[in-house]
Image (spheres, rainbow, N blue to C red):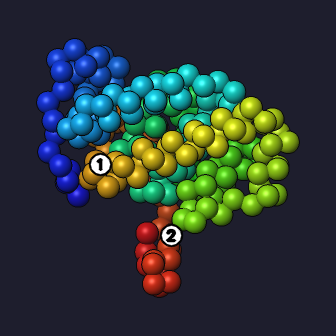
Amino acid sequence: MALRVPKAELPAELKEKMIEQLGAVPENVEVLWHSPPVAQDNLEFGARIGAWDAVDAALKSFAHMVVAARVGCGWCLDVGYFQAHNQGLDVSKASQVPRWRESEAFTPLERDVMEYAEAMTDTPPTVTDAMYAGLLDRLGPAAMVELTAFVAYVNLATRANVANGVESQGFSAVCEVPLAARPAAARSGPSGAVSPA
């Protein structure tokens, strides 16, 4: 897939800042820059969300990557893995997120957070009272509200990237452990027919 809208030219200062932070200019920012207010608000909101600290950074990283895998956002998986590497998180564990159900690398809490992120991402959402209550018991109200808002934002970002045709840029290539391949899965289409993911 190719970008569905051409890249817009970013201001030089913003371009330099992006290269300093990530080593390259993110294509999703270049696409969004066709509407600078949308791009700037998205960047600011993303930065504010990144500053939230009621939920463990690894749990949020895993939740982000699970949503990206579920939606099919290669760019988000790529950059999520790169950010986990740069934040000093367990990269060997993060590398297993696309196949978390088959992997034995995760704790029960990590698995429940990833299951919750997937359930929020389903259309319609498949979050159950028991699923929510189990996490609420272990995380507490502030962290549960934060996790829910975080997963909702990640859904916005991943779905926008996929719709705009933004793909992986190779950020994760600098990581020592390669990202695991997402297992083949079946999804139900709008007609109810099952098709390969």
- Residue 101: x and y in percent read 63, 58
Q: Is residue 126 above or below residue 99?
A: below
Q: Quadrant of the N terminus?
A: bottom left
- Residue 106: x and y in percent read 68, 45
Any part of residue 3 in sight: yes
Give, as a three-letter code, the residue at label 2. Answer: Ala
Q: Is residue 122 left or right of residue 144?
A: left
Q: Residue at the location (45% across, 78% down)?
A: 190
Q: Quadrant of the C terminus?
A: bottom left
Mark drawn on residue 32: none
Q: Secondary structure at mark 2?
A: loop
Q: Nearer the viewer, residue 195 or 190?
A: 190
Q: Residue at the location (23% across, 40% down)?
A: 31
Report which residue position mark 2 lands on: 185
- Residue 118: x and y in percent read 59, 56
Any part of residue 180 in sight: no
- Residue 148: x and y in percent read 64, 43
Q: Nearer the viewer, residue 18 or 88?
A: 18
Mark drawn on residue 167: 1
- Give yes or no for contact between labels 1 and 2 (Cβ–Cβ under 8 Å): no
Based on the displayed image, in which of its 4 quarters is residue 139 positioned?
top right
Q: Residue at the location (46% across, 30% down)?
A: 46
